[in-house]
Amino acid sequence: MIPSAVQATDVAHLIQVALTPIFLISAIGVTLNVLTSRLARIVDRARSMEAIVLRPDYQPVGRDLNAALAVLARRARYINAAITLITLSALLIALVVVMLFVNAFAPWEFSAFIAILFILSMLALAAALMAFLIEVRIATTTLQIGIEAASRNS
């Protein structure tokens, strides 16, 4: 009877250890929601601009919509990269949780592999945040250019 009590305690401790990465997955999910919302807005804006540019009676007056579309395409690439990387990060963290349980019950030692998975996850998360930062900088820079151009035209 004592061995089953020890195993139950070990499993309870393992669940406690596994909860920390699961909270990280939750935070990544919130960030992923922000990223997908930004991508949706970029796509919606690009579609509305494309509809204007593709009209047969379109005359380029004022703002250069083709240049604006190029900026939106660039922003979409960075957001798409951030989404891919942050999703990869979440998948790697999920593998960390799985490997924590496998490590507890398998006769092999996976500690180094678990550490490598976690490090890779953090690198993917950092790269995703960097891509997001670049996209935000592009958006802010083009906004400032638009404000400057509007003030010159007035």
Image (cartoon, rainbow, N blue to C red):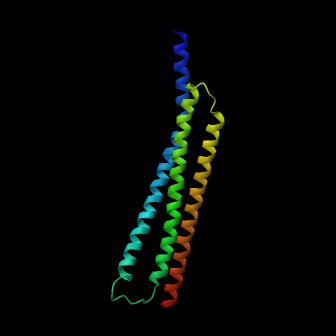
Where residue 46 sits, quadrant-wise, is bottom left
The image position of residue 27, as x and y in percent, is: 51, 47
Is residue 120 positioned above or below 8 on the image? below
In the image: residue 49, left or right of residue 98: left
**Count of all numbered marks drawn on residues in the image:** 0
- The residue positioned 63% from the left and 38% from the top of the image is 113
Query: Percent from the top left, x then y, of residue 48?
Result: 37, 75
Front residue of 106/48: it is 106
Residue ranking furthest to the front: 108
Image position of 94 with respect to 140: above or below: above
Q: Residue at position x 55%, y 30% from top?
A: 102
Which residue, as the protein is rendered here, is positioned at the far top? 1
Task: Pick the residue in front: 136 or 83.
Answer: 83
Residue 80, horizontal then vertical, whole percent: 49, 61
User: Residue at coordinates 55% horizontally, 25% vertically from top-left?
Assistant: 105
Query: How far across and down, in percent of the image, does residue 109 sit?
Result: 64, 29
Quick check: 5 above or below 41? above
Q: Vertical placement of 104 versus 74: above or below? A: above
